[in-house]
Each structure stands twice: as C-alpha cells, then as structure tokens.
Image (cartoon, coloured by chain):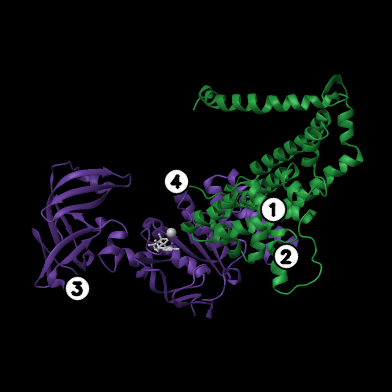
Amino acid sequence: MNQRASTALMAPALAWLTALMVVPCLLILALAFFRRGLYGGIEYTFTLENLALVFDPLYAGIFLNSARVAGTAAIIACVIGYAAAYAIAAMPRRHQPMLLFFAVLPFWSNYLIRTYAWIVLLNREGLIVQGARWIGIEGELPPLLYTQGTVIVGLVYSYLPFVILACYAPLSRLNPEIAEASFDLGASSWTTFRRVTLPMTLPGIAVGAVFVFVLSIGNFVTPALLGGGQFQMIGNTIYAQFLTANDWPFGAALSMVLIAIMMGLLFLQTLAVERGSGGRVRDA
Amino acid sequence: MRPLLEVQGIEKRFGTVTAVDGVSLDVAENEFFALLGASGSGKTTLLRMLAGFEDPSGGRVLLDGADITKVPPNHRPVNLMFQSYALFPHMTVRANISYGLEMERLPKAEIARRVDEMLGVIQLEGLAHRKPDQLSGGQKQRVALARALVKRPRLLLLDEPLGALDKKLRSAMQLELKRLQHEVGITFIVVTHDQEEALVMADRIAILKDGKLLQCGTPREVYERPIDRYAADFIGVMNFFEGYPQDGALQVKGATFTSTDPMPQGAAAGAVAAVRPERIRLGRGENTLAGTVRAMAYHGLDLQLHVDTAAGPVTLRLTADVAEAQPLHPGDPVTLGWSARDTRLFPA
Ligand SMILES: Nc1ncnc2c1ncn2[C@@H]1O[C@H](COP(=O)(O)OP(=O)(O)O)[C@@H](O)[C@H]1O
Ligand SMILES: [Mg+2]
C-alpha cells in the first residue's frame, strides 16, 4: 500500500480523535494555567500555582497512595492472569477459544453492576458474613468493605481479563520446541520457565501490567463504591475538584500530571513490546 | 562390542495413528547413522522418543546398555537438534551456546573456553554477540549444531538439519557435517527425506516406511540390494519391468530377463525386474532390449538417455567418452544390454 492511500485510510480516525479527544483534553489542561474565580469559574490570568499545589505533600501523598494501590493491583493481576493464560495456552488448541471466552465474559457486563455485586457480597449483612455466621463463626468480623484491600481486589477483578488476554497472546505463539530445547540442554522445568518462557513472554506481562496500572490509578468508581470514600485516590480527587469543589484549574493540574504519568508508562510499554518481538513461531 | 544405542521394538501410537511401529535397530559408537523416509513415515517421532520427548507406547531404548526409556530429556546424555532449530531468540549466539554448559554447573572459565572453541569450529567467532534473528539460515543452523555439540553428548540427534538450506549450501554442509562428526567423535543420527543426502553422509542408512523399519544397511547395500520395490524406487533411479516367471526367468513384454536373484515367493501372480541406469550398456548383454531414443539430457560428466522399448520406458546413463564415441539422436534405434548379476527381482 502506498503512503498516500494509508494516510487517506487513517484520516477519519485521526480526525475523530483530534476533534473529540485531543482538542477537548487540551482545552481542559490549558485551564491548569489559570486562576480559579472567587465563586468557581475561571479567572484568565496566568499562574503556575495550581501545578505547584499538585506537589504539596497532601496531594503528592494521594498520588503516591494511588500509585501504590494501582501497582499492587497490577502485580496481583499479572500473577493471577499470567497463571491463567499459561494454563489456557497449555490446553488442547480446540478448547482455547472457549476458555478465553469465559475468562473475558465478566468484561461484557456493566462495570457498575459488577462493582455493586461486590458490595452485596461483602457488606455487613452480605453473603460472606452470612455464610460465616451459618458455619458458626461468632463475634466481630473484620470489615470486608470500605478498605484499601477491598479496592485492590475490586480493581484486580475488573482488569484481570485484560491481563489474561495480554499474556495469552505471546504464550500461545511460543514455539513449543524452544522450551523443549531448554529441557534437552539439561534445564529443569523451573529453569526453563525462568530463563526461556518468562523472558520471551515478558512483553505480554508488561502490556497487562501497564493497562491495569493506568486504568487503576485514574479509576474513581471502584474507590468510591468499594472504598466508600474512606480514603482518596487521585481519580476521586480529580472528580471532587471538578464536581464538588468547583476548582477546575486545580482539577486540570492534577489531570495533567496523571496523564503525563500514563503517557510515560505507555511509552515504556511500547518500547518493551518492540524489544521483545522475537521468538514467534515462524510460518514454515 | 556392544552397540552404543539399542532400540528394541519401539512403537508410538497417537490415538488411532501408529506413527512408529515396532522399530528395532542398533547404532555403533562413532557411527554416522541416517534415518531415511518419506514425509510422515515417523522419522521425527522416532527421534523424539530417543531424545525423551515422546513416551513410547511400547519397546525399549538402551544407551551404553542402560535402559533410558523412562529417563526425562534433561537427564539423557543425548542432544537433539530441532528441525526448526529452536534457538532462544532473546539470547545472543554466545548465550545460546553456553546455556547447556551452564545447566551442567561448570566453572565459568571452562564454559567460556569451550564456547570459544565451539565458535571456532563453526566459524562464527565474529557473530557471537548477535541475536538469532540477525543471522542467515545457514548461520542459525550452525548455531543450533554448536549448541548441541558443545555439551559433548554420547549421541547427537539431528532432525532434517539441512532441510531449510538452499541446494548449494546443502551439499557443502553435507560434507561439513561429516567432517565435523569425524572431528568431534560423537555418534550422529541424522533424519532426512533426501536419499542422496543419506547416501553421501551416512555410514549406515535405515529406511522407514509407514512407521516400520524397511531396511537397514550401508549406503552400498541399500543402493545395490534394495529389499523391495519401494526401497529400490525410493533410493536413486531404478528401471522396473513387470512380468511373469517362466522357466526360472522373467517374461516381460517383448523380452525375457534372467537374474542371479532367486525368483521371489508368490511370483506366479507377477514379479518385477529392476536395473539401475548406470548398469545398462549399449549393445547386447545377458538381458537385452531394443528401443528408440526418445530424449537425451546432458549432465556434465555423463549423459542421461531416455529410451522407449516394448517393455516400457528405460533410463540409462552413458559416460561422456562412450556418448562421444557413438553420437546418438532422438529417433535412433538402439540395443540395450545388461548382465543377470545387475538384475534385481522383487514381488510385484
Ligand atoms: N503429536 C502428534 N499427534 C498426532 N499424530 C502425530 C503426532 N506427531 C506425529 N503424528 C503423526 O505420526 C506420523 C509420523 O509423523 P512424523 O514422525 O512427524 O513423520 P516424519 O518426521 O517422518 O515426517 C504422521 O502421520 C503424523 O501425522
Ligand atoms: Mg519430520
């Protein structure tokens, strides 16, 4: 395909993204450089105060905590997701599409409904507590809802299908003879996994991890519902700045830093995927 | 002396398919042994059982007299060079070659020394830092070979090692492989579907057909004394004449052939006489056929002559001096002759 034809084919997507995504985002981000009006609204005088305030210990702390929650969710999701993807890729070929379908199935239901389902499960009178009472556990039970742990569980649950798909892709393309070559040269199963299979499928893990991290760090639904507003994540904070505090310039400043972090990670992810593109089964 | 490898009635079934069907063979120390067979004849499956990747459905494998049938691949002193090479794509050439030695937990200095030595043997010293996808097909093939050889296995298994190379590189590598085997003194079992390759390289050849061992012998034996029509056809070029026995000779269309071979059992229903192209001469012989030259193909050293006869088309090879002494043209009548000693008889 020649250069002009590909440009023409890309044009609608580029126009769509530019008009409906890039421009509005830039407009919002531009607000970060202006002062907040006395009663909300915006006063168009240039300032760097908003950006400076992001690095105030209070907000820097929220960023760090969000990063910790998102990072923990990403690590847990990668361990569980990689194991699941590994198991699926080891199944007979004809069963694999069905297993993947089931792994991704929760993803097709509404995010809010899924999250509310967790509340039903975990609240004080929820299924788990009732179950515990039924098998005879008495006394005060540790709170299951509205903790940081609950938020992490919720995030892992939500984004696990991403990780399974991202890890399955390189695992299923692996030429099985490469692992066999490692056995043949005297390696144990564990050494083969550590030195051959894992490094060759690292790009998939990187993709999955970055997805979970990026989607988690900006998430505000799960912390609000499962965290019950007990602690703030950066997504909630931005939400609050725009909708409750009516401080759009500061909300924009927070968003700008968040987007910068996300872009940086996505860039690293792309690099990792490009570096690790070897080792596919060649078409014979 | 006890053979290095003894394969005793080994078989492998995949569901209803019997990929390897009761194969027994011995391979001696330092032998260059070729497994020859058409695609799907079970060569890869047999090799994978020797390497330990497939559990035999029956039979045993002995190495140095010890039963290794149940020994996992990482504990066998046997290495396999895969048809796909299966190099580690994320490691350099050097890391690929040293991997197997690291698994033996050898001292670093010794690993480095042996890897350097091996890089010299395969003449890739300059490319040690490259990744496999920066190598040509021939270079990958040599790295795969080095990776297996550097372990100094008792037995090296090679699955179509030259299959992915072009024709010219192939014939160079056939000799190279043979030289290397001689130099390192390791027993080789090479799988190939190319009969010419097997004849050039091997000390002994085993022909597989539908998972069964059809014949096993030196290149000369399998070429001169093929066990049946299939083996005769599979190795080299052969002229066949179908007919019926009469008074100890074979009656074919337009001629009667004698042979030093005994008439095969059940030949009353029909038998086949066979003769190699290079055994046929111009002029009468113990067996004689008259025909007309159809076509000639020049092959440098010799001339391939295609002749139509009453008994069917015949191919023969004439050396350059014979062809020059007696120039032939398409349409010329010729008489072909060969001796009874060079005539094989097979059941139809
Ligand atoms: N893993 C397997 N499952 C089912 N059938 C197999 C498997 N491996 C090989 N076969 C069958 O066994 C037969 C021999 O195959 P193979 O050993 O690969 O032959 P070759 O290497 O001589 O071409 C073929 O009919 C093939 O389809
Ligand atoms: Mg094969």
For the residue pair B160 and A79, the one nearer the viewer reads as A79
Label 1: which residue?
A156
Q: Are marks 1 and 2 in contact (CB under 8 Å)?
A: no
Chain letter of disc 2 in the image? A
User: Do the residues marked 4 and 2 share a common chain?
Assistant: no
Identify which amino acid the numbered label 1 is placed on. Val
Identify which amino acid the numbered label 3 is placed on. Pro
Q: Tell me the distance, in whole angstroms, between the alpha carbons under discs 3 and 1.
A: 75 Å
Residue A257, position as x, y percentages in the image: 80, 35
Label 4: which residue?
B168
Residue B34, position as x, y percentages in the image: 43, 64
Which residue: 57% across, 47% down?
Answer: A108
- Say which chain is green: A
Which residue: 25% across, 55% down?
Answer: B277
Q: Quadrant of ligand 2?
A: bottom left
Q: Quadrant of residue B100?
A: bottom right
- Say which chain is purple: B
Residue B127, position as x, y percentages in the image: 64, 46
Label 3: which residue?
B264
Q: Could you classify mark 3 by the number of other residues whose Cα lies within 10 Å: few (under 14), some (14-19), or many (20 or more)?
A: some
Chain letter of disc 3 in the image? B
